[in-house]
Amino acid sequence: FRYLRWGFRLTYLYVLGSIGYVIYDGYVSRHPDDQFTPDPSKKNLVILGTGWGSVALLKKLDTENYNVIVVSPRNYFLFTPLLPSCTTGNIEHRSIMEPVRQILRSKKASAMYYEAECTHIDSERKVIKISDNSDVKGDVHVTEVPYDLLVVGVGAENATFGIPGVRENSCFLKEIKDAQAIRTKIMDCVETAGFKDQNPEEISRLMHMVVVGGGPTGVEFAGELRDFFDEDIKKLVPQIADSFKVTLVEALPNVLPMFSKQLIDYTESTFKEEHIEIMTKTMVKNVTDKFIEAEITRPDGKKELTKIPYGLLVWATGNALRPLVKDLMSQIPAQKDSRRGLAVNEYLVVQGARDIWAVGDCAVAGYAPTAQVASQEGAFLARLFNNMAKTEALEAKVHELSSTLNVQPGNSAQIVKDIESTERQLRRVKDIKPFHYSHQGSLAYIGSEKAVADVAWLNGNLASGGKLTYLFWRSAYLSMCFSTRNRVLVALDWVKAKVYGRDVSRE
Ligand code: FAD
Ligand code: NAI
């Protein structure tokens, strides 16, 4: 009983401490310290994008060392790992967004933000062209921004491989608006299937949700969708329950190629239990408004064309280059052999370019296009830029000390000592090791409150799947959310969805 009492006391203290911290955090974010404006003679550091790479850079950057200018059409950071949960309303979209204004306001020195798309990088003149592509435009909506240092962190767009009909008929899953469009379309399909006198064949088509791409995006979405149906839609619209079906179409022989064989098998067997059909070795070739045409490779190697009717089609076949990245690559001869993005060296400098760095999905540094890689690259660049600024300050100090040596010969011993100590500091600061990615593991949600994890563990790898891994998945992503505000909102959304169910209103 004594231990139990202590347990209660400690839990009570923990809860009280957490509440206190949340209140303190809210107060601090509502009452930020005054910011100072950096010296205008400092270098212009222009950062493109507000995704994982750019925001990790901003988080760790000493903004007082540069005139920092952020350009992105999206005025918020998006925590993409929880985006599949927004498609079903398990998490509300604003819970995983962090306004870039809030991020910049928390820095010691102010930084500029322009909500715009960078449409061209002129690496010769060292200027970028930016365009306000939002609905509300002022008289000036196209202009130029000069840079001394430029970081390209614009991510990637959805790959369609030029397959006809994909853009017109399917939903992607990359941005908030995509998740909202999917959420609306799921309910539209359900309500249309429930329309009076709807014929059975049409009900089957409308209730067939097809996901193309068996990478983690497709797998997580399929899992979330099945949960939504089993836990909420089925109870509220029972008349369409028998027709609901989820199919995952993948061109390769298995889903989740980046996970170990054991976890691939686990995912496939879990999907079987959840009645999610997996069609592997099936390559989609054409998409119309009501069906997809795919080529199936049979075990004997024979190929066969099939038509799959669908109500909702989610296209998750990976990344393609953004036009801005293609345009920059075309200006740099050293990039002519790079196909998957801007080739960078071990310091993330764009090869063949002067004063341009690249991070995240738009950069090719030899790693997978993941948030984990992008954020480590961004943090590395922050250290690099902080060190570059320190180097310049120390070099200026050595220069100044050397000049006083001539005019104050009486103090020469002390000045020489100072020069030596500054030079020692300089050598330390200049000794920046190249970027090294440290893989922490891969996690994916697979539905029915189960997840799979391949986690780095004691110089090896730990593979696990199931309900416990799901708890780990939840706590890992909760702790990785950008801010305490995000963490609180996501946790409340989970509680809300568990207690009241997901909201099935369309819109
Ligand atoms: P992004 O985060 O995509 O950011 C790009 C930024 O550039 C955006 O702000 C965009 O608005 C801006 N931009 C675009 N064009 C321009 C332009 N012309 N000018 C200026 N700005 C521009 N990875 C993991 O490691 N773990 C996960 O669990 C995980 N889950 C994911 C789930 C989903 C649904 C998706 C889609 C991806 C997931 N990823 C995950 C991958 C991860 O999100 C990406 O690798 C990561 O977002 C890449 O970061 P980035 O900074 O390169 O690009
Ligand atoms: P992906 O590139 O990982 O997978 C796309 C899949 O689509 C591939 O398996 C490919 O074979 C298949 N495909 C391509 N064309 C096809 C066609 N015509 N017909 C059928 N199948 C086709 O893409 P995804 O899932 O969007 O992920 C992008 C990046 O984001 C990856 O690096 C991934 O690791 C990362 N990510 C990580 C997550 C996690 O760790 N939980 C979650 C989501 C994304």
Image (cartoon, rainbow, N blue to C red):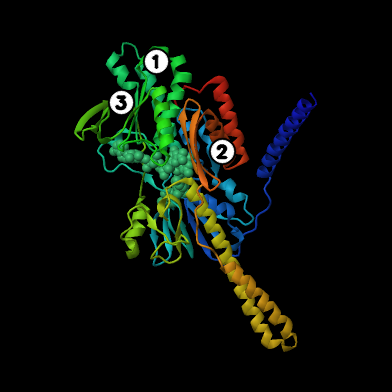
* Lower position in the chain sequence, tag 3 or tag 1: 1
- Residue 414 located left or right of residue 242: right
**Which residue lies under the disc numbered 1?**
241
Q: CA distance from mark 2 to mark 1?
A: 34 Å
Residue 200 locus on image (x, y percent): 29, 14
Q: Which mark is residue 310?
A: 3
Which residue reaches farthest right?
A: 2
- Residues at circles 3 and 1 in contact by the CB criterion of under 8 Å: no
* Lower position in the chain sequence, tag 2 or tag 1: 1
- Residues at circles 2 and 3 in contact by the CB criterion of under 8 Å: no
**Which residue lies under the disc numbered 2?**
476
- Taking the spot 50% from the left edge, 23% from the top edge, the residue there is 503
Q: Is residue 423 above or below residue 293?
A: below
- Residue 355 located left or right of residue 172: right
Q: Nearer the viewer, residue 380 or 73?
A: 380
Q: Amino acid at mark 2?
A: Ala
- Residue 170 located left or right of residue 101: left
Residue 110 locus on image (x, y percent): 60, 55
Residue 245 locus on image (x, y percent): 36, 22
Q: CA distance from mark 2 to mark 3?
A: 35 Å
* Lower position in the chain sequence, tag 2 or tag 3: 3
Q: Secondary structure at mark 1?
A: helix
Ligand 2 position by quadrant: top left
Confirm whether residue 480 shows in the render.
Answer: yes
Are there few (<14), some (14-19), or many (20+) residues within 10 Å of tag 3?
A: many
